[in-house]
Amino acid sequence: MTSKAEILALAARYEELELWQNKLLDAIYYVQEAEQSCPSGFAFSHHAEMEISDCLCEVEEAMQEIADKVNQ
């Protein structure tokens, strides 16, 4: 069984991850916006969105692990 202190620690970590998730989603939005408005003659990084998305997946996996622990 999970103690109150452990639950509070998990909740704090989840909140931290949730804030980071929102920042990553914002970053993806702005990368897409920048890519769409990139003037001709300029190369835009096609890796930026992919790398941020990879990080987002890691954050979402960590959030799911916390949710699974709490729901046990």
Image (tube, helix red, strand yellow):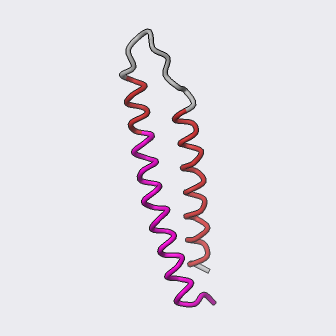
Answer with left or right where residue 13 lies relative to residue 54.
left
Asked whether 28 or 42 is in front, the reply is: 42
Answer with left or right where residue 14 lies relative to residue 22.
right
Q: Residue at x 36, y 22 (%)?
A: 37
User: Which secondary structure dominates the residues rendered in magenta?
Assistant: helix
- Whether 34 is among the magenta residues is no
Outermost residue toward the front in this view = 42
Which quarter of the figure is the N terminus placed in? bottom right
Q: Is residue 47 above or below residue 3?
A: above
* Residue 58: image location, x then y, percent: 60, 54
* Residue 30: image location, x then y, percent: 38, 36
Q: Is residue 14 above or below residue 21?
A: below
Q: Which residue is drawn at 59% across and 62% down?
A: 62
Q: Is residue 62 above or below residue 34?
A: below
* Residue 19: image location, x then y, percent: 42, 59
Residue span colored magenta: 1-28
* Residue 44: image location, x then y, percent: 49, 22
Answer with left or right where residue 26 lies relative to residue 46.
left
Q: Which residue is drawn at 39% across and 28% down?
A: 34
Q: How many marks?
A: 0
Q: Is residue 54 above or below residue 46?
A: below
Which quarter of the figure is the C terminus placed in? bottom right
Answer with the quarter of the image where residue 33 lies.
Answer: top left
Q: Which residue is drawn at 52% across and 35% down?
A: 49
Outermost residue toward the top in this view = 41
